Image: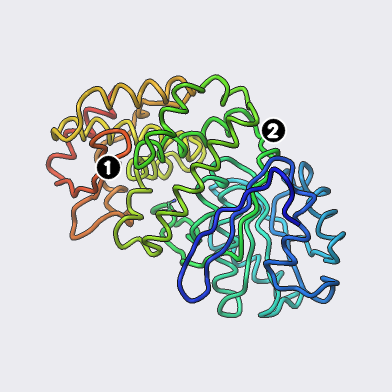
């Protein structure tokens, strides 16, 4: 089943919960056989209830290839459609999914396949974590953000009107199947936004990836197969290593939130409509770098280098006009708050970051400065 051009990165976890993340270009024809293997399904594949959770646009683009591959392996997948967009990552979506899973008589042994971006993955994972006290699921991510970040590591959940991802559970998938060829149908803006998460890995722990992006920004933007695949593989390896070391975010995993403290606040305050997740993270990384420089842990060169790369990739770097007090208020509701202090991941140099609690009094001035342009 493993074909040429298909790599596997293992994410090792205790209690047999580790899994493989397969990556390649144009590997979807192997998906069905791979599902059979990771699902521990017998030769025929029949009899095992499998649901695909997706939305109609992804279905139109990739459905026939994915379903064709599953059918060839003996599965008869049931389709569950959800509306698109972060504004629909709600408990209402979960509720509607539960209704349909019950109606189609899904059981403990059944499993779900999340086919889509981070929103589909997070909702599917959370439904899988909670339905019948937990069923299995597989990630088939179709956006850059989902392939390099959201689909890996078992964070599942939904948003609350007061903040992003406030409700959720850790529930690891059975495996992650990444076909980079599906990215060719992504709208350019969505593709570029996802690259912010790749820049994130560069800044927090992978200087070689950062340099690679600096040197190959044009190639990456043009969708060059090898350059894009390299960004995905390195990011996946980086993410897997962090999750292995700290699955439940009691320490190291916090560094993956680089740029997300302000990023989530921007998304929340603009109703999840104005900014793509990666765009908000890009702006958040710029503020974090400036704070790092202001508190004296990062030289100005770091700020400039990061800004140069984000701009070369066409990512936004400026905060929209938002009320600084509202920003601080929303940041204060985020999960990255401990004992009243908002925690920021701050770069010291490319590849090294530190998590620091920042006092509200100081933060007020920085947010006013950064967000008043
Ligand atoms: N997206 C951040 C994490 O998975 O921890």
**Of residues 94 and 206, which is closer to you in this image?**
206
Quadrant location of the N terminus in the rendered image: bottom right
Where does the image place residue 362, in percent across and percent down from the top left?
13, 39
Q: Residues within 10 Å of mark 1 (few under 14, many from 20)?
A: many
Q: Please tell me whether mark 1 sits on a helix, a strand or a loop.
A: strand
Vertical placement of residue 134 versus 277, above or below: below
Where does the image place residue 85, in percent across and percent down from the top left?
59, 45
Q: Residue furthest front?
A: 4
Where does the image place residue 336, in percent across and percent down from the top left?
30, 54
Where does the image place residue 301, in percent across and percent down from the top left?
25, 22
In-image side of 272 versus 360 (left or right): right
Q: Residue at x 65, y 49 (%)?
A: 116
Nearer the viewer's eye, disc 1 or disc 2?
A: 1
Label disc, if present, on residue 316 of the rendered structure: none
Vertical placement of residue 219 versus 109, above or below: above
Q: Residue at x 38, y 20 (%)?
A: 308
Q: Residues within 10 Å of mark 2 (few under 14, many from 20)?
A: few
- Check mark 2 vs ligand 1: CB closer than 8 Å? yes or no: no
Quadrant location of the C terminus in the rendered image: top left
Label disc, if present, on residue 353 of the rendered structure: 1
Question: Badges 1 and 2: C-beta atoms under 8 Å apart?
Answer: no
Q: Please tell me whether mark 2 sits on a helix, a strand or a loop.
A: helix
**Of residues 201 and 95, which is closer to you in this image?**
201
- Check mark 1 vs ligand 1: CB closer than 8 Å? yes or no: no
From the image, tell me which residue sits under label 2.
184
Which comes sooner in the sequence, label 1 or label 2?
2
In-image side of 29 versus 282 (left or right): right
Q: Residue at x 49, y 43 (%)?
A: 235
Q: How has the structure been colored for display?
A: rainbow
Give how far apart the Cα atoms at labels 1 and 2 are: 33 Å
* Quarter of the image where one finds residue 14: bottom left
In-image side of 233 versus 322 (left or right): right
């Amino acid at each position: 089943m493993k074909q040429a051009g298909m790599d596997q990165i293992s994410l090792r976890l205790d209690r047999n919960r580790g899994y493989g993340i397969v990556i390649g270009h144009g590997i979807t024809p192997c998906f069905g056989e791979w599902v059979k293997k990771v699902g521990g399904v017998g030769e025929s594949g029949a009899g095992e209830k499998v649901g695909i959770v997706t939305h109609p646009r992804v279905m139109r683009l990739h459905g026939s290839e994915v379903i064709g591959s599953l059918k060839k392996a003996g599965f008869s997948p049931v389709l569950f459609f959800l509306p698109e967009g972060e504004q629909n990552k709600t408990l209402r979506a979960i509720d509607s999914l539960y209704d349909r899973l019950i109606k189609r008589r899904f059981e403990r042994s059944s499993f779900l396949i999340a086919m889509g971006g981070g929103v589909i993955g997070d909702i599917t994972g959370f439904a899988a974590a909670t339905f019948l006290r937990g069923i299995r699921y597989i990630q088939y991510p179709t956006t850059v953000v989902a392939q390099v970040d959201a689909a890996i590591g078992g964070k599942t959940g939904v948003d609350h009107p007061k903040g992003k991802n406030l409700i959720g559970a850790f529930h690891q998938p059975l495996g992650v199947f990444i076909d980079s060829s599906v990215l060719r149908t992504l709208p350019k803006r969505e593709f570029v936004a996802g690259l912010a998460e790749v820049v994130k890995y560069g800044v927090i722990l992978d200087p070689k990836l950062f340099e690679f992006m600096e040197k190959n920004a044009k190639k990456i933007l043009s969708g060059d197969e090898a350059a894009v695949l390299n960004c995905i593989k390195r990011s996946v390896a980086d993410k897997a290593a962090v999750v292995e070391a700290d699955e439940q975010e009691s320490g190291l995993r916090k560094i993956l939130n680089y740029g997300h403290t302000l990023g989530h606040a921007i998304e929340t305050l603009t109703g999840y409509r104005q900014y793509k997740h990666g765009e908000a993270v890009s702006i958040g990384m710029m503020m974090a770098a400036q704070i790092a420089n202001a508190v004296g842990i990062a030289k100005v060169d770091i700020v400039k280098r990061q800004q140069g790369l984000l701009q070369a990739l066409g990512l936004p770097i400026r905060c929209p006009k938002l009320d600084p007090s509202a920003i601080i208020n929303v940041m204060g509701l985020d999960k990255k708050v401990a004992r009243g202090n908002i925690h920021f991941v701050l770069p010291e140099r490319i590849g090294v970051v530190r998590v620091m609690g920042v006092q509200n009094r100081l933060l007020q001035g920085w947010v006013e400065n950064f967000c008043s342009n």
